[in-house]
Structure formats: structure tokens, C-alpha cells
Amino acid sequence: MNEILVIDNVTKRFGGLIANSNISFAVERGKIIGLIGPNGAGKTTLFNCISCYYSADGGKILYEGKDITRETPDGICRMGIGQTFQIVRIFREMTVLENIMIGAFLRNPGRKKAEEKASEVAALFGFSEKLDLKASSLTISEQKRLEVARAMATGPKVLLLDEMMAGLNIHEIREAIDLVLKLRESGITLILVEHVMEGVMPIADKVVVLDDGEKIAEGTPDEVVYNDRVIQAYFGDKYHAKRRKNTA
Amino acid sequence: MEGVLAQTLASGLLIGFVYALVAVGLTMIFGVMDIVNFAHGEYLMISMYFSYWFFILFGMDPLYSLPAITLIMFGIGIITYYIAIRPIINAPMLSQIFVTFGLLIFLRGVAQFLWKVDYRMIPETLASGNINLAGIYIGRPQLVAAVGAILCYGVILWFLKNTKTGMALEAVAEDKEAARLMGINSNRMFALSWGIGIATVGIAGVLLSTFFYVFPEVGGAFCLIAFVVVALGGFGSVVGAFLAGIIVGLVEVVSGYLIDPSFKFMFVLALYLAVVFIRPQGLMGK
């Protein structure tokens, strides 16, 4: 089975507003999937359905063949789906090492083993020199990296990253990209929700584009950027018409 | 004069450790789930009655019945959580106050109904007697209680800093949502914080019962002091509660000694007001 995660006809309503309407796509093992779309497209809602913060009103989400639609975030974490928040939420009063240890404890119950695992993960994320610093003293981009490290310490097979690159400068985005590629090399499947197209397009194996609650395109980054509906969604009708005239 | 002051300081210090132990459970429950347990003193009362009845009915000394009562109180804490607290986790703060305050009235009423309002005392325990420490007379029950409180406090602190479950509790205390992403079931941690919180106040109750009267309202005074201790130490801070317990114990006896024993609680509460005005987050608060 090569599909680790299947989103099958997921619909989510908030009262009369349909935030996600019959969205389906599959996530292949070991790939990087970008979930993009303009503001208000329903990316975060879909992300929250996958991460089990919301339970979908219709459709199913399957992880390794199991239906996780009604699971809880801590439940899917134990099953092997790690995730980060859109806005950084590290344990501010704890040290860097303790933050990562909290994650590592999930699959390494003893303190000593958890500490070993945490140090290992810390090294991978460049925190070896900062283990004993209080987490709140890190810079924002370091805090974001710590959040990913903490999620990685739980030993996930799939990692959901929500707007990991938002608010980072160009240099930091490049670092984040390197990090994501490194994670894929280690066999992790990644789903990136990004508003920043530049961050996702160069690295994604597949991109799913949402607009107005619906999936409007799915394919490789190259296929998707030339898709008419995507251009229309991102740049509006006017630009779309102009471009059509020019290419015609 | 000096001897009397030293004597006073010693007894303040000893009772301070017990105050700290009463407050640790209160601050822990608050820290983990942001709920103030107004009935905390009533659990102290319940465990003191357990200790009394174990002695009267089975002839068990409080120091022997301590482990069993600790376990019973742990269970009572968990049961309280599932019956009374879990339904109101996301309720408005006022509802939460009514539930734990209602619990206070209820438990006190049950105690009055079952055991009347009489003051009871365990006549003689293994801890009875005095010892002479370099000219200072110290009651052995108080010394045993203080040592017990320090040991218990040490175990809790070690547990929180060094075990998977302890660190999970701390993680939930800091950010429930982030803790869920680490695979931590926050509901189970809430229940555990009630179990541990009520077990520790239970230990304090058993230790207190070796030198203090047992009666249905006994929790009131201790709970009030525990609130001062928690506010002084910083809401949710276990280390703060320990330091603040000692400070409150000392303030109580020293003001009683220098001014008048009947005014001692006035100074404790004045200290509370001072904390609220000067440093609302408490000594170790965030």
C-alpha cells in the first residue's frame, strides 16, 4: 500500500458556511505534499480535519487504511501523525531539551532513553549547543524549528506542518526548505500547508490547490502553476483575462 | 527571650511545611487545569477522619494507616474529577466556582451528619511526645509531620521533573493543546492531577491528625491558609507553594508571638493583601 493517507470526500460546514466541500486526494508514502490556496480557501479547515481538531461532517480520512475521522489529536499522534501549530506553541517555561523530551517520551518511556532520543533529535535540528536554554529565549524561527523537532521526537511517519514558513525571512525560508528535504530523506511523509507559494513549489512532489472550499487542482508544481483555475484563484479574473489575451 | 523566639521560629517552620503540603495539591490542580478547588480543605478533613476512625476502629496508628489512606484519597480525588469536575472543564469560571464551593458545603454537611460537630482527638500516637533539640522543645508529632511533608514534597518534585507522567503533567499545565500534539491525553492528566492533589492533602491530613483536633469545619482554616500560600507562591507553582508555606508558617507564629496569638491570621491575610498589591503573580508565578 503506497498511500499512507487518503482524504476521501471530506466536507466540513460551519453553520451555513461550507469550508470544505467534497475534497479528495491521496498522499503517497515518503512524499512532500503542498496544500495551498488563497486566504479563506479552506486550507486550515482541511488541515484541522486531517489533524483531528475538527471532525469532518462528511467523508472519511484514512491513515494506513484505518479510519481516523473521529480520532483525537493525541490519538493520531500515538498512531504516528505528528503536527505543528500555525502560531508557535512551544513549552516556553521549559528548556529546549525538555521540550523535545516531552515528545520523545511517547515512544521512549524511561527518562534516560527519552533524553538520549531527544539529544539525538536536537542534534539533527541544530540545537546541540542550546539544550539548556529556556525555550522562550529562542528567536521566532528557532522556536518554529523547535516545534518541528518536538513533533519529530514523537517518532511520526507523517508530519503535518501548518504555515511553517509564514513570517520567516528569505534566508530562514531556505533553511526551512533544507530541513523539510532532510526530513523527507529520512523517510517521513510531509504535508505542508502554506500561503507562501515560493516555499512549497520548489520542493513539493505534489500540490493540492484549494479555493473557496473546493479542490481546484492537483498535480506536480509545474502542472499546477499553469492551471487556469489556479491562476484565476490567485490573481483574479482581470489578470486571468489579460493573460489569456496575451497568450492568444 | 532568645530561647522563646527560637522556639517560636522552630514551630513556625514546622507548621509551615505542613501548610506547604496542603497547598501543593491545590496549586497542582490549579496549574494543570485552571480550576480552583474550594473544597480542598474538606478533603483534609476527610482524611483526618479516616485517620481517626482507623485508630478508633482498628487500633491503627496514623503512621501505619498513612499509606492506605493516601491510596484511598488518591481514589477519591480521581472519582471527584470524573463525577464533578469533568463536566465543567469548559464551563464559565463562575460555574466552576459553584461546583467546587458546592462540594465544600456538601462534604462538610456529610461530615456533620455522620460524625456530629464534636471535636475529636487521637489520644496517643507513635509520634506523641517532645524532644529537646539544643534547648528548644519540639513536639514530636509536629516534627514527624514536617519531615513527612518534606519527604512527600520531595517525591512530588522528583516525579514532576524526572518521569514521563510527571513531565506530561507539566506539559499539560503549560499548554494543553501543545501537549495533545505530543500524544498526551489531557483528560487522563487532569484526573491524575486530582488524584495526586487530593492524595497529598490526604497525607497532610493524616500527619495533622496526630496533634490537631478533628471536626467537620477543620478544613476551613487550613484551606484559607492554603489559598494565601498558593497566591504568595504563585498560582500553579509547586516550588513557590513550598517556599510560601514556610513563610506563612513563620509569619503566623512570629506575629502571634510579638503581638497577640489571636491576631495571627490577621497578619497572614495582610501578607496575602500585600502580595496581591505588590506582586500579583506571586513569588514564583509567571
Image (cartoon, coloured by chain):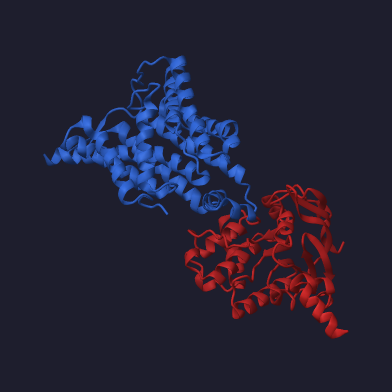
Chain colours: A red, B blue
Between residues B192 and B128, which one lies in front from this camera angle?
Answer: B192
Q: Identify the image quadrant of residue A5.
A: bottom right
Between residues A179 and A119, which one lies in front from this camera angle?
Answer: A179
Q: Identify the image quadrant of residue B220.
A: top left
Q: Residue B279 location, x and y as percent?
A: 33, 51
Name the residue furthest left. B1
The answer to whether residue B138 of the structure is visible from this angle is: no
Q: Identify the image quadrant of residue B7.
A: top left
The answer to whether residue B257 of the structure is visible from this angle is: yes
State which quarter of the image contains the C terminus of chain B: bottom left
Is B219 on the left-hand or right-hand side of A220?
left
Is B210 on the left-hand or right-hand side of B165?
left
State which quarter of the image contains the N terminus of chain B: top left
Q: Residue B3 location, x and y as percent?
A: 14, 39
Q: Residue A173 location, x and y as percent?
A: 63, 76
Q: Residue A116 location, x and y as percent?
A: 58, 64
Up/down of A51 relative to B127, above or below: below
